[in-house]
Image (tube, rainbow, N blue to C red):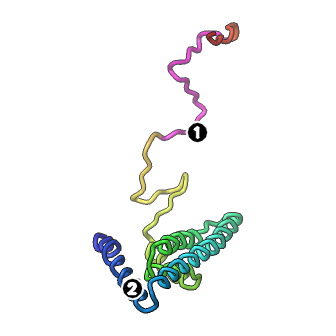
Amino acid sequence: MFLLLTILFLVVPIVELYVIVQVAGGIGTLETIGLLILVSLLGAWLVRREGIGVMRKVQTQLGEGKMPTAQLVDGALILFAGALMLTPGFVTDSFGVFLLLPPTRILVRKALMAQFKGRVQVGTMGGTMGPNMRFGGPIFDVDSTEQTTPDHVDLTRDNDDTEPPSLPR
């Protein structure tokens, strides 16, 4: 994990700067800045378009009573792609566009779902739980017919004759 973070925070910015300098040397500084802005705008449009499409699929799946697992993973990948598109640079923008295109996103989604399959355990209310799942806190029996009264309530006093308390003036 430390190696991955080191790569993300040290190597990626250095690679991005190198590529930006190389592109600026080839086409010019203003053209490079314009290209970075254009790619970011294109990425924002793609993120919006793909995000709306995924939200529609999620709503359809939920309307049918199904869990939209693949669509939720797609949504997370689109969110990650949007973050990559916001990061200035051609390398991160390339990966962002890669994740925004449905055919490549499907491949990444399948790889991620295969990677995490078997790592996630789902418990249901009243069903059995996996060996590593624990719930904390008290257990309340909502089917019980026994009634309990808080300690601060006096049940021996008849409250029908009393007048409601008046507000202070």
The residue identified by callout 2 is 19
Q: Nearer the viewer, residue 119 or 109?
A: 109
**In this rendering, is residue 7 above or below 149?**
below
Q: Nearer the viewer, residue 7 or 108?
A: 7
Question: Residue placed at 50% from the left, 61% from the top?
Answer: 122
**In this rendering, is residue 72 above or below 151?**
below
Residue 45: x and y in percent read 61, 75
Quadrant in the picture for the N terminus: bottom left
Q: Is residue 38 magenta?
A: no
- In the image, taking residue 74 as reference, residue 26 lies left or right, namely left
Kind of residue at disc 1: Val
The residue identified by callout 1 is 142
Kind of residue at disc 2: Val
Quadrant in the picture for the C terminus: top right
- In the image, taking residue 39 as reference, residue 48 lies left or right, namely right
Question: Residue placed at 50% from the left, 85% from the top?
Answer: 31
Range shown magenta: 139-159
Residue 140 appears in the figure: yes
Residue 15: x and y in percent read 35, 82
Disc ID at residue 109: none
Residue 110 appears in the figure: no
Residue 106: x and y in percent read 55, 81
Sequence-first disc among 1 and 2: 2
Q: Is residue 143 magenta?
A: yes
Residue 114: x and y in percent read 47, 78
Q: Quadrant of residue 6?
A: bottom left
